[in-house]
């Protein structure tokens, strides 16, 4: 039977996430601690054991607004979906939790590939249904770092290589964030970019928490003429570095610091023995008029492989409140952020 872990078991739980086939940093207590410091609540980490080994588990977050509760397992739960008994026990336990917590839905997003039709069929069979509004990106761009630095650079699109070399010729440098004054400069750039692109930006304290308290995170800065012109927040877990957040000063876009910074992050990832650099969200549509097509073109220049997951699935104990929420004309991402 699944059980809730004690706080002194967090290291063991995180080790399970690290060795799980679909293990993702969003299922660790590092991500839990970050999100719970900024609006979410900890709904617990649960494990299923067999012969002293953890064979399934998940970290669950809770959000309560307007009298409504949402339970969420980002990039989880973690279990072997080929094992029918473990699958049934895990999914039934999640549904029971939703009912006991009186949540109007519980959301899971196990990292199974879109091509895995069996996974989608099993989730639907257990009354978990694909969400029309996804919080996490359904598709990503994964760069393979298992080669030499020169081979990796040679694999990039010709224009991407040109822009990297241009940034080097212009004297752009890349390094880790060193102090709070630099963090403040970086955040001002993030604010400007959020205003230009009209998206919800996390608070300054959110980024300060990442810098000061998350051992799996680093913030890289690009500088031109000793001035910070942009930065990228990177999380590293298992064999992968993840591009989480980033922003650049549009005034300096012609010096191409945004290209050089990712090149340097990949170079450092290779030196650390990482296998992949996950450039994160890309649109499923390849339409050049899509609002995210520019991001797609930029990321594609690094010769990444597009990977699509099955996405997020919801179980709603009471159907009508969930349908109302699905159709309500407010920003669901802001509610769940």
Image (spheres, helix red, strand yellow):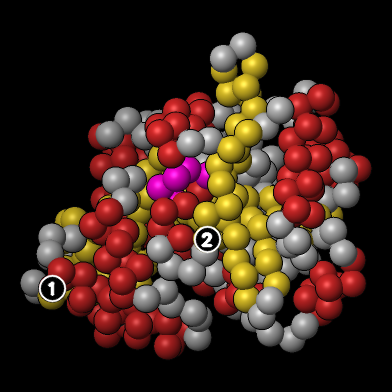
Query: From the image, which quarter does the N terminus lie in?
Result: top right
Dot 2: few (<14), some (14–19), or many (≥20) neighbours within 10 Å? Answer: some
Q: How many numbered marks are there?
A: 2
Query: Which residue shows up at 62% across the image and 70% down it?
Result: 64
Q: Which mark is residue 181?
A: 1
Q: Would residue 238 be visible to someone looking at this image?
A: no
Nearer-N-terminus badge (2/1): 2
Magenta: main secondary structure: helix
Q: Would residue 63 be visible to someone looking at this image?
A: yes
Drawn side of residue 315 relative to residue 277, left or right: right
Query: From the image, which quarter does the C terminus lie in?
Result: bottom right
Query: Which residue shows up at 37% across the image and 44% down it?
Result: 236
The answer to which quarter of the image holds residue 285 is: bottom right
From the top left corner, tell me how far across and down residue 203 is, in percent.
37, 76
Drawn side of residue 200 relative to residue 8, left or right: right
The answer to which quarter of the image holds residue 171 is: bottom left
Of residue 165 and residue 190, the one placed in the foreground of this image is 190
Relative vertical location of residue 171 with respect to residue 60 in this rendering, above or below: below
The residue that label 2 is drawn on is 41
Find the magenta span and give its range.
27-31
Marks 2 and 1 close (CB-CB < 8 Å) = no
């Amino acid at each position: 039977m699944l059980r809730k872990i004690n706080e002194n078991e967090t290291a063991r739980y995180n080790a399970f996430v690290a060795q799980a086939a679909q293990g993702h940093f969003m299922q660790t207590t590092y991500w839990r601690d970050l999100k719970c410091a900024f609006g979410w609540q900890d709904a617990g980490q649960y494990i299923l054991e067999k012969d002293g080994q953890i064979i399934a588990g998940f970290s669950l977050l809770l959000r309560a607004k307007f009298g409504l509760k949402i339970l969420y397992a980002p990039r989880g739960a973690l279990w072997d979906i080929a094992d029918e008994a473990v699958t049934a026990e895990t999914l039934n336990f999640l549904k029971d939790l939703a009912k006991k917590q009186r949540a109007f839905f519980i959301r899971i997003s196990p990292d199974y590939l879109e091509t895995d039709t069996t996974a989608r069929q099993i989730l639907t069979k257990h009354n978990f249904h694909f969400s029309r509004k996804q919080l996490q990106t359904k598709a990503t761009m994964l760069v393979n770092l298992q080669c030499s630095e020169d081979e990796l650079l040679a694999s990039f699109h010709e224009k991407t290589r040109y822009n990297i070399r241009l940034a080097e010729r212009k004297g752009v440098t890349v390094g880790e964030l060193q102090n709070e004054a630099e963090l403040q400069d970086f955040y001002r750039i993030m604010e400007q970019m959020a205003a230009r692109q009209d998206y919800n930006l996390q608070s300054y304290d959110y980024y300060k928490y990442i810098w000061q308290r998350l051992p799996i995170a680093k913030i890289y800065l690009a500088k031109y003429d000793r001035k910070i012109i942009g930065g990228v927040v990177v999380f590293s877990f298992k064999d992968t570095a993840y591009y989480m957040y980033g922003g650049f000063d549009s005034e300096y876009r012609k010096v191409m610091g945004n290209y050089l910074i990712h090149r340097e992050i990949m170079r450092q990832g290779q030196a650390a023995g990482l296998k992949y650099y996950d450039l994160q969200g890309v649109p499923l549509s390849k339409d050049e008029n899509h609002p995210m097509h520019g991001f797609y073109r930029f990321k594609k220049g690094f010769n990444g492989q597009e990977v699509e997951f099955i996405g997020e699935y919801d179980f709603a104990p009471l159907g009508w409140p969930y349908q109302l929420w699905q159709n309500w004309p407010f920003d669901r991402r802001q509610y769940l952020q």
